[in-house]
Image (cartoon, rainbow, N blue to C red):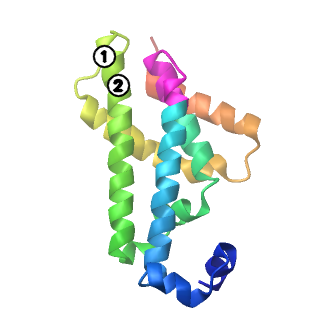
């Protein structure tokens, strides 16, 4: 709270005028970072024309952007914080937004006859979970070129599977 007050140029007691607790301050910061992350992902997606390009842009921008956002990353990954109901709400809201975004991309691919999926909703949930599981290992001390290579490999598996054709 002292650091936040110093950054805001206010006294610590002034913060409590706007926020009831440090948890509420943290929730506000995490919520703002979540919105910023979603904007960056949406921008990356909208710059692509094809469904597969949009899906790749989602994966890349999600992984690259979340590492820049310490508070959101902490809220999403830290089990200690899972005790706070507001963090769970933010996690759920963020997960739902991501799943809806991926489902829109998959539905576009189905409409354009590029993807053949029995259930875009289920597939979207699975892809979001896979990407979330890969975020930490994919970005830990990894140079940009290696990240690109890893993301490309993940995308090849998602788009083409591992079956020999």
Q: Is residue 62 magenta?
A: no
Label 1 secondary element: helix
- For label 2, the residue is 106
- For label 1, the residue is 110
Q: Is residue 117 left or right of residue 40?
A: left
Q: Nearer the viewer, residue 136 or 68?
A: 68
Q: In the rendered image of this protein, does residue 37 appear above or below residue 45?
A: below
Q: Nearer the viewer, residue 113 or 11?
A: 11
Q: Main secondary structure of the magenta part?
A: helix
Label at residue 83? none
Q: Quadrant of the N terminus?
A: bottom right
Q: Is residue 52 magenta?
A: yes
Q: Is residue 48 left or right of residue 137?
A: left
Residues at circles 2 and 1 in contact by the CB criterion of under 8 Å: yes
Label 2 secondary element: helix
- Image quadrant where residue 23 sits: bottom left
Within 10 angstroms of label 1, few (less than 14), some, or many (20 or more) residues? some
């Amino acid at each position: 709270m002292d650091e936040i007050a110093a950054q805001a140029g206010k006294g610590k007691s002034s913060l409590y005028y706007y926020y009831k607790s440090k948890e509420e301050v943290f929730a506000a910061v995490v919520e703002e970072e979540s919105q910023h992350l979603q904007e960056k992902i949406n921008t990356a997606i909208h710059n692509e024309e094809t469904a597969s390009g949009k899906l790749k842009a989602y994966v890349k921008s999600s992984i690259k952007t979340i590492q820049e956002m310490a508070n959101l990353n902490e809220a999403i990954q830290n089990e200690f914080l899972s005790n706070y109901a507001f963090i769970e709400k933010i996690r759920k809201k963020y997960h739902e937004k991501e799943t809806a975004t991926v489902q829109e991309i998959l539905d576009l691919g189905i409409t354009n006859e590029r993807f053949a999926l029995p259930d875009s909703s289920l597939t979207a949930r699975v892809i979001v979970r896979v990407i979330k599981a890969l975020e930490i290992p994919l970005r830990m001390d990894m140079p940009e070129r290696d990240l690109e290579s890893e993301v490309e490999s993940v995308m090849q598996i998602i788009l083409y599977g591992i079956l020999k054709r």
